[in-house]
Amino acid sequence: MLDALRRGATGWVAKIFLGLLILSFAVWGVADVFTGYNEGALARVGKKEITSDEFQRALQLEIDLLARQLGRRPTLEQARAFGIDQRVLSRLIGSAAVDAHAQQLRLSITDEAVAEAIRNDPSFQNPDGTFNRMALENVARQLGLSEYGFLALRRSEEIRQQLTDAITAGVRAPDALAEALHKYRNEARTVEHFTIDPSVAISLPEPDPAKLKEVYEANKERFMTPEYRKLAIINLNMDEVKKRVPITEEELAAAYEHDKARYEVPERRRVLQLAFENREEAEQAAAAIAQGKSFEEVAQERGIAEADYTLGLLSRSDMIDPAVADVAFSLENGAVSGVIDGRFSTVLVKVTEIQPGKQMSLDEVRDQVRDRLAQDKAGSELNRLYDEIDDRRFAGKPLKDIAEELSLPFIEVEATDRAGKAPDGSTALDVPDAQRILNAAFQGQVGFEGDAVELADGGYSWVDVISVTEARQRSFEEAEADVAALWREQEMRRLLSELGSKLAERAGQGESMEALAQEVGGKLETARNVKRLGGAPGLPDGAVGQAFITPQGGTGSAETRDGKSRVVFKVTEVIPAPPASPEELSQLKTELNRQLESDVLTGYLTALQDRIGVSINEAAYRRAVGITSEQQ
């Protein structure tokens, strides 16, 4: 966690997300401060309000970062499953708390100091140590910030850094702790082991009926049928609403003309750019190119890697500096510009590829235009249908009749449990947001009309409970096959455990591990240099853990990772940790220092929040992360 507090953190996009706000350490422990108050604020830290808009912007930035890591964009529900929403709110609260403390202490930083910090940041430097404005532009672009916005963001981070550096400056791990940790991690074992083959070693008898009944009685709750419900559903998602929206050819043509620029594919160019500290250096490079050197050779002589001077395939609007864009989009393919006095630095550019722009015709984008028109009109159509359905429900009409009258999609689910499974195990309701609809169905009752269920795309579903088949206890005769399966599972585990203990005992008394392995259909293997952390092939974590509390020559057994057998092992060698090198001790001390600093900062933030006061508007938070009343 302390990587986020250190200037040495690499990559400014990650640093902005993880380091700029500093602060997720103790914040989510404030679950008991949820309160309701003015709708404009999602959270309040002292006098500072965090709005829903601020939270959602930060959440989207964090999801963007995760999307780049995963290679795909997670949904909001997936982001919640990762805990991203909690982490973002933690950072915003922690950031606001530290900012408040900094203001109380009257900490500030000059414009010159902020500019100097950016210039000296390794993330914004070329390999030769010169300032790389392109890196700054790229970060600002990825964060969706103007230059002014980025500078304001960096100023806040620098002030927080002053405060947190002062708090953690004296935190240092003693050498003895680092040495102890080294010994703990690097002590090793050599372990002989084999896995019992249950089909060879264990012969299960036919279960005794009396024993089966005993298992049934002891585990009755496992042999219940689920509650099933028969449902009637009108499912009106936005795609269905858009299909119902009438759109004429005249409307399509008018919409196309109104938004014609939207359907223009802009000219794109692959642009290379070299930035220079001053115009004199740029002119020298331009002269070298004029005398026959290539753009790439000049870059190589300056120690600049291709990835650092390649901007990529860009449209004019993608380029931050208008002066550079104007020149880049006036060059012939393969041409190098003259010296450009850009907004951020003096540069030379080269164009290596040109993709001409194109105006798409109405026929080419007809589906897109219609979809946009339908989307614009869908809200009104949805409201009309909502009122039509509500009027008919008020009149006592069943959903099936309403669906027929209005030509709406109707679904009848004969039987479903809470998880959406039919009695035969198949999927009972196969539509988007099925679980949201089922949650509403299982909160409703027969004969009572529940509220419409809001769908993720903005549409609605109406669900009525037609009948309920209550959960019931299956008789022993009904459940006998499942009872027998449970007995076999339990009995196999018991017999394997007993056999594993006996084999380990025999190995401890001197019998050959090789012979014992052959006896139970196993294959003897040797795991060397096994350490506490990292595990070993063929050895479950339970066996590794036991091996490190077992003396040399000691034996034991542990369940396999899949729970279907047992591993029998013998510790044949205990290998003490070698002396730690100065480099290893230094690395361990750095790691321990970070952990200790994290503990200090956690205590600081907890105390700071307690003193300043933190409250969270639960309703606003749930709305911001898309948690509906049915999901609460």
Image (cartoon, rainbow, N blue to C red):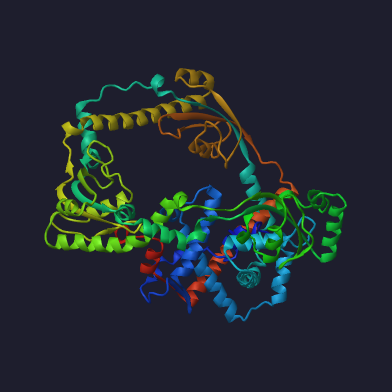
Q: Position of residue 457 (x, y in %)?
A: 36, 56
Indicate the quadrant containing the N terminus: top left, top right, bottom left or bottom right: bottom right
Q: Position of residue 188 (x, y in %)?
A: 62, 37
* Of the pair 329 and 16, the residue shown nearer to us: 329
Using the rendered view, name the quadrant where residue 491 is placed. Answer: top left
Direction from residue 519 to residue 166 in the image, left or right = right
Q: Residue furthest front?
A: 250
Give me the residue at 71% from left, 46% from top.
Answer: 580
Q: Position of residue 370 (x, y in %)?
A: 39, 55
Judge whether residue 2 can be spotted in this image: no
Q: Position of residue 362 (x, y in %)?
A: 45, 53
Using the rendered view, name the quadrant where residue 602 is placed. Answer: bottom right
Using the rendered view, name the quadrant where residue 443 is placed. Answer: bottom left
Direction from residue 300 to residue 622 in the image, left or right = left
603 shown above or below 445: below
Q: Residue furthest right?
A: 291
Judge whether residue 544 can be spotted in this image: yes
* Of the pair 245 and 306, the residue shown nearer to us: 245
Give me the residue at 50% from left, 48% from top.
Answer: 72
* Of the pair 598 and 456, the residue shown nearer to us: 456
Indicate the quadrant containing the C terminus: top left, top right, bottom left or bottom right: bottom left
Give me the residue at 22% from left, 34% from top.
Answer: 214
How many numbered discs? 0
385 shown above or below 298: below
Direction from residue 382 to residue 93 in the image, left or right = right
